């Protein structure tokens, strides 16, 4: 997660956030300082070039639910171009505690717009406003809306990627592995256009909720103390339990499995993934991304995992710009089930752009 978070239910009819929600918001606000300092560190053109970007905010991809909330709004940043441009759908994390997924999209757009990519910052409903699978329905409704309105906003409907961090990384992974699955399309917004994306870039995503606690790098005591929880991720007040509406170890197994991106891999061809995660992450343990990469590789899907030995949580911008965060980074790649050995890498925004360029090539139409 990064950017300044609104509390869960802020400005809504939802319940007032507890200590856990406030702790997530404080951590995100601190990360916003890092984000602000890092912006522009890897920009390919002067900031004045951003004047050629058309910005449209507060677009409703579906009616507000509950009324007055922001979980069905998106902001759009489109670079001016003679041809329709590819799109990156971005949603930031908050532990599903806030409908603030648009926050930080302007910073991502500042890095991707100069390379010719539009960015849509998409908000989805918080766990106090709706339970899973509503959040998956929201992001897929946004993708359908964007594809259906591509001509109006000068977007290429055949070249759409999805990106997010923390719970937003989960959102990106879930959308990527369930595109156009009828049983998981939901009832949000526009119908008809495809919800499939052509590439996914999740940063430190939760994946298998039931295996998070076993891989916490320093155990759960500090995590519980920081967020005012008991029982770590398996506890009744954890972000994952709030998302599902029950303590994850006591929820119906089918519900927990449905919220796990790994469950949906192997049933059909999955779009290529670029996954980024720090080994010092004490909020979403690194093994969550390793599990995702291993499952994609075993299924024969294309995947890259960039590992940051010194990075913690909420470090999206630092992973692509800061020496201390990137030091010792390495990547593994699997293509059609054939993996490579780990190799050192210094990731930048060009790493992300090169991945997108390769996966979102023009169709030639």
Image (cartoon, grey):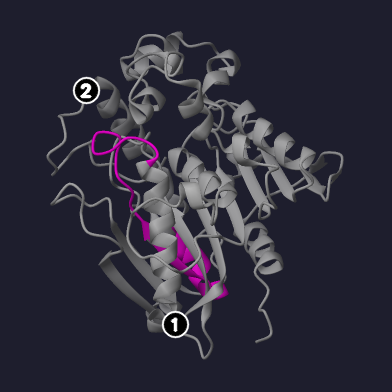
**Location of residue 26 by image quarter:** top left
Most foreground residue, 4 or 149: 149
- Tell me what residue is drawn at x 46 percent, y 28 percent: 255
- Tell me what residue is drawn at x 47 percent, y 45 percent: 171
Q: Which mark is residue 18?
A: 2
Most foreground residue, 47 or 100: 100
Query: What is the span of residues highlighted in magenta in the rendered image?
Result: 108-133
- Tell me what residue is drawn at x 68 percent, y 65 percent: 359
**Location of residue 349 by image quarter:** bottom right
User: Could you classify mark 2 by the number of other residues whose Cα lies within 10 Å: few (under 14), some (14-19), or many (20 or more)?
Assistant: few
Q: Position of residue 302 (x, y in %)?
A: 75, 51
Q: Which residue is mark 1?
A: 154
Helix, strand or loop at mark 1? loop
Q: Position of residue 353 (x, y in %)?
A: 63, 64
Q: Is residue 114 above or below residue 286?
A: below
Q: Which mark is residue 251?
A: none
Most foreground residue, 324 or 97: 97
Most foreground residue, 150 or 40: 150
């Amino acid at each position: 997660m990064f950017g300044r978070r609104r509390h869960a239910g802020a400005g809504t009819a939802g319940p007032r956030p507890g200590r856990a929600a406030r702790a997530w918001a404080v951590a995100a606000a601190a990360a916003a300082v890092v984000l602000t300092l890092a912006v522009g560190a890897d920009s390919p053109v002067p900031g004045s070039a951003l004047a050629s970007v058309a910005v449209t905010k507060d677009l409703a991809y579906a009616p507000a639910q509950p009324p007055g909330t922001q979980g069905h709004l998106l902001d759009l940043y489109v670079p001016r171009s003679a041809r329709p441009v590819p799109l990156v759908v971005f949603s930031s994390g908050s532990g599903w505690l806030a409908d603030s997924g648009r926050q930080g999209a302007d910073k991502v757009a500042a890095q991707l717009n100069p390379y010719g990519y539009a960015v849509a910052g998409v908000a989805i409903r918080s766990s106090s406003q709706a339970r899973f699978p509503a959040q998956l329905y929201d992001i897929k409704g946004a993708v359908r809306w964007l594809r259906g309105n591509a001509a109006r906003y000068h977007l290429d409907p055949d070249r759409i990627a999805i990106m997010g961090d923390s719970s937003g990384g989960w959102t990106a992974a879930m959308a990527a592995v369930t595109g156009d699955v009828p049983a998981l399309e939901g009832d949000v917004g526009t119908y008809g256009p495809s919800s499939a994306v052509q590439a996914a870039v999740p940063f430190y995503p939760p994946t298998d909720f039931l295996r998070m606690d076993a891989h916490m790098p320093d155990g759960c005591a500090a995590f519980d103390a920081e967020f005012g929880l008991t029982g770590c991720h398996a506890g009744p007040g954890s972000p994952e339990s709030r998302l599902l509406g029950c303590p994850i170890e006591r929820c119906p197994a089918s519900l927990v499995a449905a919220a796990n991106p790994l469950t949906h891999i192997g049933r059909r061809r999955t779009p290529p993934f670029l996954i980024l995660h720090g080994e010092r992450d004490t909020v979403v343990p690194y093994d969550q991304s390793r599990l995702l990469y291993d499952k994609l590789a075993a299924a024969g899907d294309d995947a890259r995992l960039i590992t940051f030995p010194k990075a913690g949580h909420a470090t999206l911008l630092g992973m692509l710009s800061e020496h201390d965060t990137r030091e010792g980074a390495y990547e593994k790649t699997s293509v059609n089930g054939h993996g490579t050995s780990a190799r050192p890498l210094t990731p930048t925004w060009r790493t992300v752009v090169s991945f997108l360029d390769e996966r979102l090539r023009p169709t030639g139409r």
